[in-house]
């Protein structure tokens, strides 16, 4: 897994990549995650905590992202390209009736 930060590429080990992908999945599903969550299942299935995989600086960066993250989980099955019918003034969406 590669990440871009500060104009340079950063490479992660496969274990770090798996951990970060899991974190992204949890954020997408729940909309939020706390630092304490990193020490509970499902994160502890791969490591006892982030200290097993990341440096202190990397953990600080993960914590900063979690504190600043505002993720709105997608719980609406309506495709993003088509607004819900109720959002069109005066009746159903012209796209929905096609």
Image (tube, grey):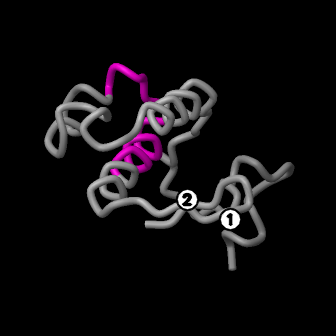
Q: Report helix, strand or loop for mark 1.
A: loop
The stretch in magenta equals 22-37
Assess disc 1: are there few (<14), some (14-19) or many (≥20) residues with their C-alpha within 10 Å of its C-alpha: few
Residue for badge 2? 78
Drawn side of residue 33 relative to residue 6, left or right:
left
Residue at screen point 66% across, 54% down: 5
On the picture, is 71 further left or further right than 88? Answer: left
Contact, CB < 8 Å: mark 2 with mark 1? Answer: yes
- Residue at the outermost bottom position: 98
At horizontal 68% and vertical 65% (from top left) the residue drawn is 82
78 or 23, which lies in front? 23
* Extreme residue toward the right, this view: 89
Is 26 included in the stretch rendered in magenta? yes
Measured from the top left, where is residue 58 in percent x and y? 48, 39
Q: Which mark is residue 82?
A: 1
Q: Check disc 2 and report its element: helix, strand or loop.
A: loop
Q: Quadrant of residue 12?
A: bottom left
């Amino acid at each position: 897994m590669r990440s871009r930060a500060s104009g340079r590429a950063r490479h992660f080990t496969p274990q770090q990549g798996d951990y970060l992908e899991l974190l992204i999945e949890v954020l997408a599903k729940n909309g939020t995650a706390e630092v304490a969550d990193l020490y509970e299942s499902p994160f502890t299935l791969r490591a006892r905590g982030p200290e097993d995989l990341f440096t202190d600086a990397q953990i600080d960066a993960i914590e900063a992202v979690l504190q600043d993250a505002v993720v709105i989980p997608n719980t609406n099955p309506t495709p993003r390209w088509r607004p819900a019918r109720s959002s069109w003034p005066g009746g159903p969406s012209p796209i929905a009736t096609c």
